[in-house]
Image (cartoon, helix red, strand yellow):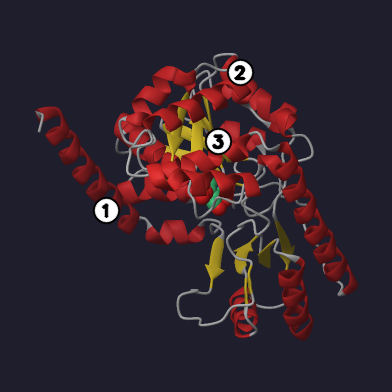
Amino acid sequence: MSSQSVSRRNWLKSSTMIAAGLTMGTTKWAELQARPAETFVHPLADLPVIKARLSSNENPFGPSEKAKKAITEALPDSYLYPREHLMKFRKMIAQEEGVSEDHIMLGAGSGELLVATAICYAFKNGAGSHVLSADPSYMQLVRASTNIGIGWEKVPLNKAYDYDFSALSGKVTDKTSLVYICNPNNPTGIVTDPQQLAAFCESVSKTKPIFVDEAYIDYTANPKKVSMVECIRKGQNVMIARTFSKVHSFAGLRIGYLIAQPDVIKEIAKFGTSGSSISSTSVRGAIASYGDQEFIKYSVAKNNESKEFLYKLLKENGYTYLPSQTNFVLFPLKMDGKRFVDEMMKRGVSIRSWVFDDKQWCRVSMGTMDQMKAFAEAFKQLA
Ligand SMILES: Cc1ncc(COP(=O)(O)O)c(C=O)c1O
């Protein structure tokens, strides 16, 4: 082991301890601050039968027939490491995104890429630095950073539950290690204005890297317009994470990728597996699914049917909701969120609750029509 890695370890240990001490010393002060969003989901493990699992934004309308065929055909060769298939997949992504292959890093789902990024920037910036994000948002990168001992600066969403870019810009300091943006955002489902986000990326990325998580981009009306990949093409210090877990229905197959400047990819790759955590079956399935526009259209259309069903149900029962461009919908509850989650679970329906902006919220993922009907039946009993 090199002396550099030993001293890095010591730094990490001491920075974690410093951060832990600081947190303990400032608990009261922190309590006085606006509370971060809280979320609650019933543990699925202790449930024998579940009618509708609508708590993890999975996509029940796939994987596609092409993907399933490719996976089956890949099985006999799966004693081999999938190197050439990973290279082919990376090339396909690079061509589609209009960047060179060294801009792409593959992962078994985007989650491991978010965590690798968190670890990389924690090492780079050290104790006292922080990641900056909106609240509420997807927490995987933030949580990995705070678990290491890095701080979290949060900016509440604005009144329309959208990003407040001027507030975010105002929170950037020399201690900011990176800015995390999720677009469309999870848990709100709202897509932010691409022009505003592009302007934010252009100005802030001059001093700080920006990580844009585009997990749900394929559900937006115009994914190419919403994506920030042009910022990367222009050479800006912007990273983009994508996942196959959503529109491609690969949540259990685990495929994701990161697009960033080649020097940034090189740095983050030191803390990831550079695709070697991906199975040969999954990557071959992903290659088959990647360009399958017919399946993507089908998947989005089925998702929208379920969404329209939910919107109608909510309206009929006097509920409002946030307009979603994803495969989930967030709506304000008229009862305690944890109680709602438990009561729905007793009826075989798994959903997730949030507390923010002084309101209790339910986030429901889009399921098949049968699953949506199971949701509706349980919901009407409680509404
Ligand atoms: C915004 C966002 N990013 C990333 C992920 C991670 O997904 P995966 O690890 O399955 O690619 C999720 C999962 O729900 C998500 O909602």
Mark carried by residue 287: 3
Q: 224 above or below 286?
A: above
Mark carried by residue 21: 1
Viewer can see residue 99: yes
Q: Residue type at mark 3?
A: Ile
| Viewer-nearest of discs 1 and 3 | 3
| Viewer-nearest of discs 2 and 3 | 3
Query: Which of disc 3 and disc 1 is earlier in sequence?
Result: 1
Quadrant of the snapshot with the C terminus: bottom right
Element under label 2? loop
Residue at 57% across, 20% down:
232
Mark carried by residue 98: 2
**In front: 245, or 152?**
245
**In front: 310, or 293?**
293
Query: Which of disc 2 and disc 1 is earlier in sequence?
Result: 1
Mark carried by residue 352: none
Residue at 63% across, 74% down:
337
Point out residue 295 in the picture as x, y percentages from the top left corner. Answer: 71, 44
| Viewer-nearest of discs 1 and 2 | 2
Label 3 Cα neighbours within 10 Å, binned few <14 / some 14-19 / many ≥20: many
Q: Residue type at mark 2?
A: Gly
